[in-house]
Image (spheres, grey):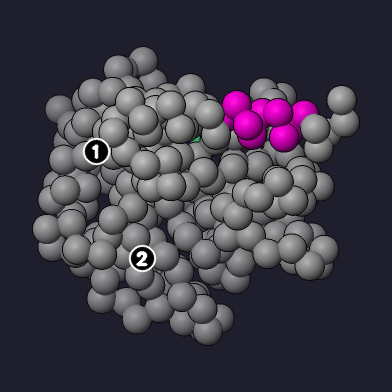
Amino acid sequence: MDRREEIAANLAAVRERIAAAAKAAQRHPDEITLVAVTKTYPAADVLHLAALGVRDVGENRDQEAAPKAQEVRTAGVNVRWHFVGQRQRNKARSVASYADVVHSVDRVSLVAALGDAAAKAGRTLEILVQVNLDPAAQDAGEEQLRGGALPARVPEIAAAVAAHTALTLGGVMAVAPLGADPAAAFARLAVVADRLRADHPNATVVSAGMSDDLEPAIAHGATHVRVGSALLGKRALLG
Ligand SMILES: *Cc1c(COP(=O)(O)O)cnc(C)c1O
């Protein structure tokens, strides 16, 4: 099987999982956007995905994403780039030059950095507030390793996003905490998302669910699932 066929088979399987999970939740599969996370894989794979109808692509490291986005653009292919990585404050200018959506904003200082960079580039970025769902972090009142703002901090970050002219507030994003029940975590995220929508009715995005937990995410209202290894294969390195 060549690479295109391999990705096509994986994509069909992922689309089937999304459809089955949507049906089980009495939702329409069209409500769920598949973001293909292509980190550690080459631009050629992005081109395969795009040829197979995938419009949304995710990356987590600017050093890798910036040249990849350039290569894809040079090939004349248009996709929406989703930046899902941590610690991008000193990379704000670069990220703002190619990203369409940033999923991992968990502090006000990052809002200003991305917003000012987007304004300088004459672009508008859609921002998702990353929420920390780790029960230990809630108890300690502290953000833990996997990133994300504590639910209590979300309104303040969202307000900063909404106030910046070069940013739009898309909604929330989360990664299920390691070792915890993903369904319980995504249920907590749904509560945070509901509260956010009460203040910001257009902030409808719930980015949750990856290769191993997209079903519970869709059961709890995910509008975007971020899928890497189930589409492209297991990554050699942790990324
Ligand atoms: C790598 C990554 C994904 C995709 O993970 P898979 O388990 O390969 O599907 C999703 N979200 C974020 C934030 C990631 O870094």
Residue at 66% of width from left, 50% of height from top? 53
Q: Position of residue 97 (x, y in %)?
A: 60, 71
Residue 127 lies in the magenta-colored region: no
Give the quadrant of the N terminus. top right
Residue at 43% of width from left, 52% of height from top? 103
Q: Position of residue 212 (x, y in %)?
A: 48, 22
Query: Would residue 141 be found to the left or right of residue 90 on screen?
Result: left
- Magenta-colored segment: predominant secondary structure: helix
Which label was assigned to residue 111? 2
Q: What is the CA distance from the residue labelled 2 to the residue labelled 1?
A: 21 Å
Residue at 53% of width from left, 53% of height from top? 83
Residue 7 lies in the magenta-colored region: yes
- Identity of the amino acid at label 2? Val
- Asked if the residue at label 1 sits under 8 Å from ligand 1, the reply is no
Query: Would residue 218 be found to the left or right of residue 185 on screen?
Result: right
Circle 1 residue:
189
Name the element at disc 1: helix
Q: Is residue 177 visible?
A: no
Q: Which residues are magenta?
A: 6-14
Give the quadrant of the C terminus. top right
> Relative to the observer, which residue lies in front, 164 or 73?
73
Residue at 39% of width from left, 28% of height from top? 21
Foreground disc of the pair 2, 1: 1
For disc 1, the neighbor class at 10 Å (few under 14, some 14 to 19, many from 20) is many
For disc 2, the neighbor class at 10 Å (few under 14, some 14 to 19, many from 20) is many
Report which quarter residue 38 is drawn in.
top right
Q: Is residue 225 visible?
A: yes
